[in-house]
């Protein structure tokens, strides 16, 4: 019955690239044995979770949803997934995603798009589950898995959480080890949990976070007991509402849910004030220079020699083998990012684009630091629109990138941030609210999110 349930949901949503229900059952059996032997149980004991297919899992194919990694079976386990298994969780399978985590709708996967379990009232058009962690969001929203891992470079935990009515937190950059996670943009990538509610996210993040000597940007700090610190009482807390996020084209339903969120935080005792983050309008352009630049460098390793796919046309030399492998293995969006990235890093354009983007990134961080002298957390919508239909934005990359407008600034500044469900749009689709906190203040972010729940 267990296998059939996973298979049925899989047929409907395509959330998984591979299912491994036997691994989840094995973990459950181990928990039973440990309990019988009187051994202490971990925080995730027996919980079957989905693993975004960006995490290397020993002995289980890891593809980043790209043909170029098809058939790659890692001989090692990522630090974050290992921590989850050590805490007693079991793996239901590897979840679908946008190829190399590049996208906001899960349509760039080489293994087919993921279909959101949600529909508009009175309409059957299939909707995007958000991206890049669209398999994770769809699986949790459809109740196939109580929780899943995600990764977030510019919004890939938060926007899919918002699009499917679930919760997801991106911790402070450095909280979770990046070791064994397929790299997209290394100065931005962070792992985090996606689950039904704030408490589940707190519990799961505690098991995922922690210092790892194998990641040079990992923070050597103790992991707080975020679950024990949960409190929806916001008396004495100050919440900032950044006026620059009231952008043109902000969906009326989204604006309404933002106002509702402000009212909920006031009810919880918070003092709500207007703030300014003056460089917000440059964040998207900055992100779409820095992220592709780092991606073009990280993706240079897929050369047909070391991993997965190799295309070796008759009589081809080494260069031709590289070119044939990369042409066949990478999808269109990945190629677009590599071209943008190599362009902004090229000798003639480096200063004009890459150096400039790094300077603006610093200004964006300073905006936040200045705001946090006055406020404890910042509240914004997670995305400027309700979930859109599959296919609606896939032919226009800029339209797609614009959906990240509220999630990328906090990523550029490395801040902890969370999306929680915040009611439905006028046609019955989930909307998310987004809480941004000071560096290392995951507790403040979780608590304000709890007050919104
Ligand atoms: N949608 C953004 C992008 O395509 C963010 C992706 C992510 O966070 N991995 O780059």
Image (cartoon, rainbow, N blue to C red):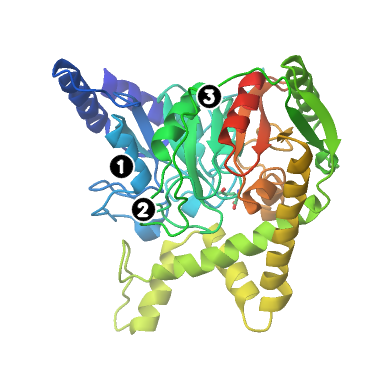
Q: Residues within 10 Å of mark 3 (few under 14, many from 20)?
A: few
Q: Which residue is mark 1?
A: 82
Q: Real-space Cα distance between discs 3 and 2?
A: 30 Å
Q: Is residue 14 visible?
A: no
Where residue 158 appears, as percent x and y from the top left, is: 59, 37
Where residue 429 appears, as percent x and y from the top left, is: 66, 24
Residue ID at (68%, 72%): 355
Seen from the viewer's position, the closer of residues 129 and 349 is: 349
Q: Which residue is mark 2?
A: 180
Q: In the picture shown, does residue 89 fall above or below 291?
A: above
**Is the distance from the Cβ of mark 2 to the nearest ligand 1 atom less than 8 Å?**
no
Q: Which residue is mark 3?
A: 229
Q: If you read the primary sequence from the N terminus, does the residue marked by circle 3 or circle 2 appear first? A: 2
Q: Real-space Cα distance between discs 1 and 3?
A: 25 Å
Element marked by disc 3: loop
The answer to whether the residue labelled 1 contacts the one labelled 2, judged by CB atoms less than 8 Å apart, is yes
Say the numbered circle drawn on residue 74: none
Q: If you read the primary sequence from the N terminus, does the residue marked by circle 1 or circle 3 appear first? A: 1
Seen from the viewer's position, the closer of residues 245 and 322 is: 245
Which picture quadrant has residue 85? top left
Which picture quadrant has residue 123? top right
Q: Which image quadrant: the C terminus?
A: top right
Where residue 142 appears, as percent x and y from the top left, is: 47, 23
């Amino acid at each position: 019955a267990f296998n059939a349930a996973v298979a049925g949901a899989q047929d409907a949503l395509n959330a998984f690239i591979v299912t491994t229900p036997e691994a989840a059952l094995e973990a459950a059996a181990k928990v039973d044995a440990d309990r019988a032997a009187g051994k202490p149980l971990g925080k995730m004991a027996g919980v079957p979770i989905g693993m975004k297919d960006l995490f290397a899992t020993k002995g289980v194919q890891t593809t980043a949803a790209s043909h170029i990694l098809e058939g790659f079976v890692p001989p090692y386990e990522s630090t974050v997934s290992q921590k989850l298994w050590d805490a007693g969780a079991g793996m239901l399978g590897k979840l679908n995603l946008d190829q190399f985590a590049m996208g906001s709708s899960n349509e760039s996967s080489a293994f087919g798009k993921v279909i959101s379990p949600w529909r508009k009232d009175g309409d059957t058009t299939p909707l995007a589950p958000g991206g890049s962690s669209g398999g994770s969001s769809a699986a949790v929203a459809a109740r196939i898995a109580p929780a899943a891992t995600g990764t977030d470079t510019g919004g890939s935990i938060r926007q899919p959480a918002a699009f499917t009515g679930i919760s997801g937190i991106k911790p402070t950059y450095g909280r979770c080890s990046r070791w064994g996670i397929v790299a997209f943009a290394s100065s931005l990538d962070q792992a985090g949990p996606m689950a039904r509610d704030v408490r589940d996210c707190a519990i799961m993040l505690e098991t995922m976070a922690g210092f790892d000597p194998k990641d040079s940007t990992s923070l050597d700090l103790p992991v707080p007991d975020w679950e024990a610190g949960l409190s929806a009482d916001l008396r004495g807390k100050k919440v900032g509402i950044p006026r620059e996020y009231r952008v043109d084209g902000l969906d009326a339903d989204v604006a309404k849910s933002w106002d509702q969120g402000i009212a909920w935080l006031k009810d919880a005792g918070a003092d709500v004030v207007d703030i300014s983050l003056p460089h917000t309008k440059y964040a998207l352009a900055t992100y779409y220079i820095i992220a592709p630049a780092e991606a073009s460098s990280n993706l240079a390793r897929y050369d047909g020699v070391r991993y997965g796919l190799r295309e070796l046309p008759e009589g081809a030399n080494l260069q031709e083998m590289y070119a044939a492998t990369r042409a066949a293995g990478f999808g269109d969006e990945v190629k677009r990012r590599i071209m943008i990235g190599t362009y902004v890093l090229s000798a003639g354009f480096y200063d004009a684009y890459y150096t400039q983007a790094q300077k603006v990134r610093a200004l964006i961080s300073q905006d936040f630091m200045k705001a946090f002298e006055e406020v404890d957390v910042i509240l914004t919508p997670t995305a400027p629109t309700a979930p859109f239909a599959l296919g609606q934005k896939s032919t226009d990359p800029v339209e797609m990138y614009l959906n990240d407008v509220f999630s990328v600034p906090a990523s550029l500044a490395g801040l902890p941030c969370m999306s929680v469900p915040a009611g439905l749009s006028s046609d019955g689709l989930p909307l998310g609210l987004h809480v941004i906190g000071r560096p290392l203040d995951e507790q403040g972010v979780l608590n304000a999110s709890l007050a919104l729940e």
